[in-house]
Image: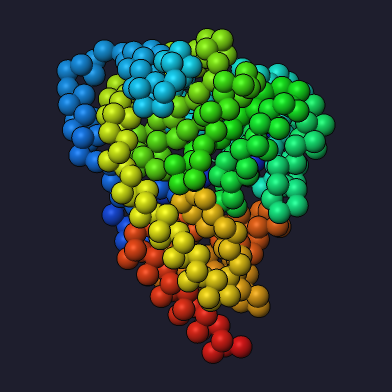
């Protein structure tokens, strides 16, 4: 087949996004590779989704997810016309590229960051500039602005490092940026503060949130974007007509109406994060202080390669994420914070791997 004659050149030339491994249901693996929440959602959310199944599924959902926008407005103190709902926050990132970036136009982000931004830019025919983080992981405000980007991504807390830049740097970036700034707050509920308060002063700021991490609903696929109403109107033109299905809208409303029910798992994840940071440091790992529900852990010196660790942990039944294609991250593992039992199993496996390495050396 001569597919190269049919498929767009940008697509043929791009590698495509590599999602983390999603093992088949029922495999007895401890899954610490895609930053899901180890607790399920509260009963009220499951009940709302269950109640939405039935004959009404023959009908299309509300096109703009109005019930979710209204629930988000109640929960976060904004207006419904400042909210756009996505089929996961990834859907909102796709819409953002479609809305702002034409062929050949520049998209920039600090590096390393979420690895989806670059392929989304390629899909749109844009040109992606990865700008290294500054000293002590500060936002490279001037270098980002100097790219002339139509769109700058800033992830806070960042993935995979877990660090959260000061909000003052976000504000400085909004002022300096020649185009719009998308602040990706997928992990912000694990952080000590958030950027919603910046929206009023920065009309070029868009903030995205995910239901997949703190709200334990990765399988439902829901995300929110907050912005000025004028921008939201334009987003509605580029979104798929019925982008969020009925079950997802029902579950999202219930989650937003029950936010306090998520507080205990979020608190427990923060506690486990701090405990695991200490436990891994004690074993020779270098850990970037994290404000998210994962750690970036550089392996102990002279303990093999990152790829060796991924293989050995997998043999012990534990999945972690490794960004081996990026030389700067080749010796680092990204580890999701799970239950206390899962964290204990991880530390036990790490001890066994280290003991084995010292026996062989
Ligand atoms: C920084 C960042 N943004 C967005 C997402 C996507 O989240 P969602 O499941 O809402 O599409 C992820 C998922 O891993 C992420 O790490």
Compared to residue 82, the image places residue 11 above or below, namely below
Q: Residue at x 43, y 72 (%)?
A: 347
**Is residue 61 placed above or below 293 in the rendered structure?**
above
- Residue drawn at 41 percent across, 39 percent down: 212
Between 183 and 251, the residue placed more toward the observer is: 183
Count of marks overlaid on the render: 0
Of 30 and 171, which appears nearest the observer? 171
Residue 64 versus residue 198: which sits nearer the camera? 198
In the image, residue 163 lies at what x, y percent? 59, 50
Q: How is the image coloured?
A: rainbow
Q: Quadrant of residue 12?
A: top right
Could you tell me which residue is drawn at 52 percent across and 80 percent down?
Answer: 354
Query: In this rendering, is residue 147 above or below 236?
Result: below
Residue 220 percent across, percent down from the top left: 34, 34
Q: Relative to 235, is 24 on the left or the right?
A: left
Extreme residue toward the right, this view: 146
Please identify the quarter of the rendering in which residue 55 is found: top left
Question: In this view of the protein, can residue 282 be seen by the observer?
Answer: yes
Residue 72 image offset from top left, x and y in percent: 38, 24
Front in this rendered view, residue 2 or 104: 104
Q: Position of residue 28 (x, y in %)?
A: 32, 61
Q: Residue at x 28, y 33 (%)?
A: 258
């Amino acid at each position: 087949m001569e597919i190269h004659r049919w498929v767009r050149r940008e697509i043929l030339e791009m590698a495509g996004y590599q999602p983390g491994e999603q093992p088949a249901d029922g495999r007895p693996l401890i899954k610490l590779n895609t930053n899901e929440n180890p607790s399920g959602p509260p009963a009220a959310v499951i009940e709302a989704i269950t109640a939405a199944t039935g004959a009404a599924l023959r009908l299309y959902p509300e096109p703009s997810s109005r019930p979710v926008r209204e629930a988000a407005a109640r929960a976060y103190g904004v207006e419904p016309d400042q909210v756009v709902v996505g089929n996961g926050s990834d859907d909102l990132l796709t819409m953002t590229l479609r809305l702002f970036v034409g062929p050949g136009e520049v998209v920039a982000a600090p590096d390393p960051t979420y690895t989806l931004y670059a392929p989304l830019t390629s899909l749109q025919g844009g040109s992606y500039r990865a700008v290294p983080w500054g000293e002590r992981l500060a936002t490279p405000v001037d270098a980002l602005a100097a790219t002339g980007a139509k769109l700058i991504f800033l992830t806070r807390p960042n993935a995979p490092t877990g660090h959260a830049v000061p909000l003052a740097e976000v504000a400085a970036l909004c002022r300096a940026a020649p185009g719009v700034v998308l602040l990706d707050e997928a992990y912000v509920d694990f952080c000590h503060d958030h950027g919603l308060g910046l929206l009023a002063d920065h009309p070029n700021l868009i903030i995205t949130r995910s239901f997949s991490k703190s709200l334990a609903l990765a399988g439902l696929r829901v995300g929110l974007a907050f912005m000025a109403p004028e921008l939201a109107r334009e987003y509605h033109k580029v979104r798929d007509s019925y982008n969020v299905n009925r079950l997802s809208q029902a579950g999202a409303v219930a989650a937003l109406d029950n936010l306090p029910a998520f507080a205990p798992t979020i608190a427990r994840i923060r506690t486990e994060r701090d405990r695991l940071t200490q436990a891994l440091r004690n074993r020779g790992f270098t850990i970037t202080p994290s404000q998210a529900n994962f750690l970036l852990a550089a392996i102990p010196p002279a303990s093999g390669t990152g790829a060796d660790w991924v293989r050995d942990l997998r043999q012990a039944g534990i999945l972690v994420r490794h960004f081996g294609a990026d030389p700067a991250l080749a010796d680092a593992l990204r580890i999701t914070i799970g239950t206390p039992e899962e964290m204990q199993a991880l530390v036990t496996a790490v001890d066994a791997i280290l003991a084995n390495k010292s026996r062989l050396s």
